[in-house]
Amino acid sequence: MRLIESPGRILEGSSIRYTETETVRTFASEFSGGMRQRAVIAMALACEPEVLICDEPTTALDVTIQAQILELLAEIQEDRDLAIMFITHDMGVIANVTDKVNVMYAGEIIETAEVERLFENPKHPYTRGLLESIPGSQSGEQLRTIDGNVPTPTESATDCRFAPRCPKAFEECTQIHPELVPVDGEDEDHVAACLLYPEDRSTAKAVEYHQRKGGGDGR
Ligand code: SF4
């Protein structure tokens, strides 16, 4: 196998102490979880990308290594002026490292906002359910969950994908596909795909707005 031209530069950029015999010729199975993650980051940076996509970058790492990996990514972002997209289920990662969040449900973006705003004032019932299910600091506190299951790809979907599990669902939710709309009717920086919004309108007017925006048939 041909080795990359300057493995030391790339590995050291990812905080791996480099010696050719010790590191480049080591089998992946001999690396710790943190080292493997750093090696993958080094590989991803080898072609000097402008965007780095990190899919669950801290899963299966202990909290100390998680913190080191996130710190490393933050340093790399600053040094290289990179855009980084995180895909994660970890609310702590989202709160600590992101500027803007897209919340997805069943393959669709259902809420978008700046990170502080999303945590302070979540609007979509699914986002609220997710944030309420984070374990609290009070011992003995009952952990909240979202009833039901995510639809499978082969399941015929109702028009709002979340309707079968939504505590706020009403009749039109199973007839009209919600579009992403500004939650307050104006600010395009905080949008949600839910028939309850824009919140400055009655529910009937909001439903009409989604119908119009979706082309009348809801899709
Ligand atoms: S559109 Fe209806 S079912 Fe869907 S999230 Fe909003 S209230 Fe719930």
Image (tube, rainbow, N blue to C red):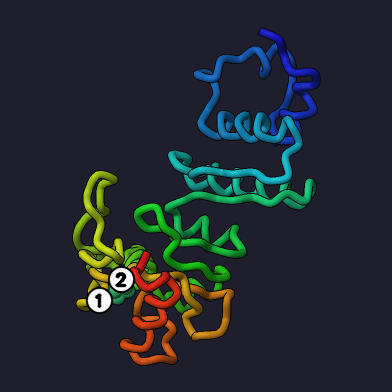
Count neighbours of disc 1 (C-alpha within 10 A) and say few if under 14, some if 14 to 19, many if 20 or more.
some
**Amino acid on which the number 1 mark rests in the picture:** Glu
**Amino acid on which the number 2 mark rests in the picture:** Ile
Q: Is label 2 in contact with label 1 (beta carbons under 8 Å)?
A: yes
Name the residue carrying label 1: 172
Kindly identify the residue that appears in the image at 74 percent across and 32 percent down.
47
Q: CA distance from mark 2 to mark 1?
A: 6 Å
Picture layout, residue 47 above or below residue 184: above
Q: Locate the N terminus by quadrant.
A: top right
Residue 132 visible: no
Residue 157 in the image: state x and y as whole percent: 25, 56
- Does the numbered disc 1 mark a residue whose Cβ is under 8 Å from ligand 1? yes
Residue 80 in the image: state x and y as whole percent: 78, 46
Residue at disc 1, secondary structure = helix
- Does the numbered disc 2 mark a residue whose Cβ is under 8 Å from ligand 1? yes
Residue 181 in the image: state x and y as whole percent: 47, 75
Kindly identify the residue that appears in the image at 70 percent across and 11 percent down.
21
Q: Locate the C terminus by quadrant.
A: bottom left
